[in-house]
Amino acid sequence: MVSFLDFEKPIAELEAKVKELRAMPGAAGASIDDELARLEGKTDLLLRQTYARLTPWQKTLVARHQNRPRFGDYVAQLVTDFVPLSGDRAFADDQAILGGMGRLKGRPVMIIGHEKGNDTASRIRHNFGMAKPEGYRKAMRLMALADRFQLPVITLIDTPGAYPGVDAEARGQSEAIARSTETCLRLGVPLVAVIVGEGGSGGAVALAAGNRVMMLEHAVYSVISPEGCASILWQTAEKAQDAAAALKLTAQDLIKLGVIDQVIPEPMGGAQRDPKAAIASVGYAVSSALDELAGQGAAALRAGRRQKFLDIGRLPLTA
Amino acid sequence: MANWLNDVVRPKIRAALRRETPDHLWKKCPACGQMVFHRELADNLHVCTHCGHHMRIGPEARFDLLLEPGYTLVDPPEVQADPLKFRDERRYTDRLKSARTKTGQSDAVAVAYGTMDGLGVVIAVQNFAFMGGSMGLAAGEALVNAATKAVDHGVPLIAVTAAGGARMQEGILSLMQMPRTTVAVEMLRDAGLPYIVVLTDPTTGGVTASFAMLGDIQIAEPGALIGFAGPRVIEQTIRERLPEGFQRAEYLLAHGMIDAVVPRKAMKATLVRMISLLTNRRATPAALAAPGPAAANGSTPPAR
Ligand SMILES: [Zn+2]
């Protein structure tokens, strides 16, 4: 059962009515069928209209939706022969970044991503997708392994940001993020990065310096959360809606700015309404990108990736 | 009146008279609260004569400190101004204008090419006074240019960092300076040239999480605040007081995150010695005889 966001309330009410009608004893007969069809049509239309013009702030809420598919869901549906790999070989096994190898449509790959969890207990275990240095160092280790054995790397980004805590600082949070970004940029194998939910600042970039960077249709990617930006520039977090708009953090803005390469469509009403379909379209997009990159050698992949980032902001912007 | 003096008059005077600040003006040390004569402070490289606190200095003072006279300032890059047409309570273009008036600089990163005891170097200095040293298209491009220049001349790059946060007004393009400046570092690596980072107070946020932590050698000035998340953000997250000296240069040294804490006075000699060793080139003998990192490590960190 998918939970509803505040702005989805009218849709929720319609859906509740449909459900009620269906559950009515002896819910058959022409008049009830007509009413059901009418209500369902109305619900569908409202859903389409709402999702066709989500505001940047609404997109932020959808991107953070608790029922969106998580790293574990993507792996379970897309990857066969999956072998999870753990630990940074120095301190711990961070549960906020997971990874392993397996096959995507038959091709051996390394897949790494943030895991936010899907219930209270697992959200706490995965620290809400906020990684510590050991998480980024695990990611680096897996990327280096992939590089050595010629496995393309896929990263799935979904984090509010890197964890801001005393222990994370003591172990070099900033150095870990910087090295992880550097590792991405040095890879001699293809790196395809997909922002599937929240792309929160440096904690996202650390896994996102890829040959191809894609975003799900309702994902967001930003230098700071709208709330954080509002509290600094507007002196109140209540201006988060304005900040969300000003930051240009939606997939539609970012493709115009030349920051991402592709927007992956989500099922109607967002990935949370039909996780299977959302995961399938991510799988298709990543797999096609890997096909395109397959012919390139290590030097070309590296050079192309670096040039792609150098070009960002140099090209004429239209947004 | 006092505010008007601070907010309006002082910056204007500073901009106009930057090179000839009257000798009779004094400055209050933010660490110990003592008054220090400006002339005395300048002679002491803007290190408090009472407590040793290293005050923030801008690019010009930094170039003068490290480079021989006659260095060349590298032209600031041409970039798109205000790419997002950002506006909060003020227009971004207005904020930029004020920062330019205040600092006399076009953006947060200034680059110069020159020699240190005869050894050629490119130095990029981040100016905290310019919108908190934050990185946008202009600052990022300046750093990329600095790396390109270093590679073209076959000389090391020194980055002197200072930043308090992101250039939010450039949104995602500010964030993209993390991978872009990392590419700049890779250029040095590929060319086999040293890249040395001097972390100054404060260096936090995306800058620390990119080029500022990727030096072949990492040096910090005493007492400098260095971290990923700012202390206030961390306090809000963990809801407790932070340990004494947390995120200071000495804390990072003790935690294995940097190579050395070097006082400003010994900075040039230390850098010269490092570059001379890494590139196996001789500096002038006078420089090699000057106090180096060994003397630096013996100094006590300033009380804060
Ligand atoms: Zn003092």
Image (spheres, coloured by chain):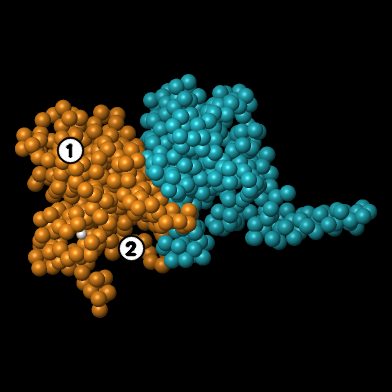
Chain colours: A cyan, B orange
> Mark 2 or mark 1, which is nearer the start of the sequence?
2
Q: Amino acid at mark 2?
A: Arg
Q: Where ligand 1 lies, by quadrant?
A: bottom left
| Residue A271 shows up from this direction | no
Tell me: is circle 1 under 8 Å from ligand 1.
Answer: no
Tell me: is circle 2 under 8 Å from ligand 1.
Answer: no
Is disc 2 surrounded by few (<14), some (14 to 19) or many (20+) residues within 10 Å? some
Q: Are marks 1 and 2 on the same chain?
A: yes
Give the letter of the chain under mark 1: B
Q: Amino acid at mark 1?
A: Ala
Residue linked to disc 2: B95
Residue sitting at the far bottom? B1
- Of residues A223 and B5, the one nearer the viewer is B5
Q: Residue at x 35, y 45 (%)?
A: B208
In the image, taking residue B212 as reference, residue A240 lies left or right, namely right
- Of residues B16 and B197, the one nearer the viewer is B197
Which numbered circle lies on residue B84?
none
Q: Residue at x 17, y 38 (%)?
A: B294
Q: Residue at x 42, y 26 (%)?
A: A188
Q: Position of residue A217 (x, y in %)?
A: 58, 46
B257 shown above or below A15: above
Secondary structure beneath dot 1 equals helix
Residue linked to disc 1: B294
Give the letter of the chain under mark 2: B
**For the residues carrying marks 1 and 2, which lies nearer the camera in this image?**
1
In the image, taking residue A5 as reference, residue B29 lies left or right, namely left
